[in-house]
Image: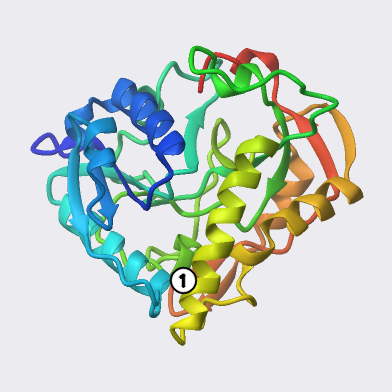
Amino acid sequence: MDQTKSLLAVSTMVYQDYFFLERWYAYYAAQVGAENLYVFSHGNDPEHRRIAKNANVMNLPRDERMHKFDRRRWRALGSYATGLSDFYNWIIVSDVDEIVIVDPQAASSIPKYILQNYSNPQTAPKNISPLCLELIHIPEEEPLPIEDEQTILSRRRIFRPNQNYSKPCLVGGPVVFGPGGHRNTLGRRHMPEDMYTLHLKFFDYGKMSAVAEKRKQTVINAGKLGSSYNETHGWHKTLDYYRDIVAAAKLGNENIRLPRFRAKMQKQVEKYSNQFVWGTARTNRLFRIPERFSDVF
């Protein structure tokens, strides 16, 4: 490790999404300290400053037309991460509903896991993509509500592995991200054995439905202003995607390693110059995160 730098920073950009920011902030502040969190408030929302009161909260103006929104957003996040790389050895860059966790059997925190596995700069990868565990709420299987005093993984542990959201989100140097953060300029990806990304989009049917309706209206409004973000965008179809996943799913047992799924992903493809994407890996099976993760997030 470069001893002139701090170990780890975490960065995100958020528009409204107060529930997710509350969980994001509480979790990462405990992991790395609130002073090492960097939150871009899209639209200069005072509620973001109230929630993430000790983080570094910065304003980004909001364009209701959402012109080239995803490209611009991730270019900005990459540029900022590049600047932070002069002061931090590692930076996590992800959406506010994407949370990096570590198997508690391997380490008690992300910083400890990094120090155990990536402390040698000569051998440590710079482009780390944890396997995505996309939580899928099936109310009849997990009927308990999400409550403020309860961790999410104490109530929701059914997931599907998702190659698309196994993003290269932990970076160890200057970086440029492609749209959505699904690829970057740091070359081939490394997938850790005991680090994962939780994707919370479908984690709770009630909360998902409320968010889906807001985002659906957002793209409808943008479309009326002439944007390419309109009724054809995925945000218009969130509930349809969820229903398709559940209708096709086969629920399995506790399993988080998924070696065959990982092996398919490791057949990486260079999509653009030095920008790699995972090999194709798909499954209709749902699995359960082991109970030992219940207190992690």
Image location (x, y in percent) of residue 274: 43, 73
In-image side of 86 versus 294 (left or right): left
Image location (x, y in percent) of residue 52: 26, 33
Image location (x, y in percent) of residue 159: 72, 36
Quarter holding residue 293: top right
Quarter holding residue 109: top left
In-image side of 97 versus 176 (left or right): right
Q: Nearer the viewer, residue 269 or 150?
A: 150
Q: What is the image's colouring?
A: rainbow
Quarter containing the N terminus: top left
Residue at 46% x, 75% y: name it: 222
- Residue 114, above or below 293: below
Residue at 44% x, 79% y: name it: 273
- Residue 18, above or below 224: above
Image location (x, y in percent) of residue 50: 23, 32
Q: Nearer the viewer, residue 28 or 168?
A: 28
Give the amino acid at mark 1. Answer: Gln
In-image side of 243 versus 157 (left or right): right
Per the image, the residue denoted by label 1 is 275
Quarter holding residue 48: top left
Residue at 72% x, 54% y: name it: 239
Tell me if residue 132 can be seen.
no
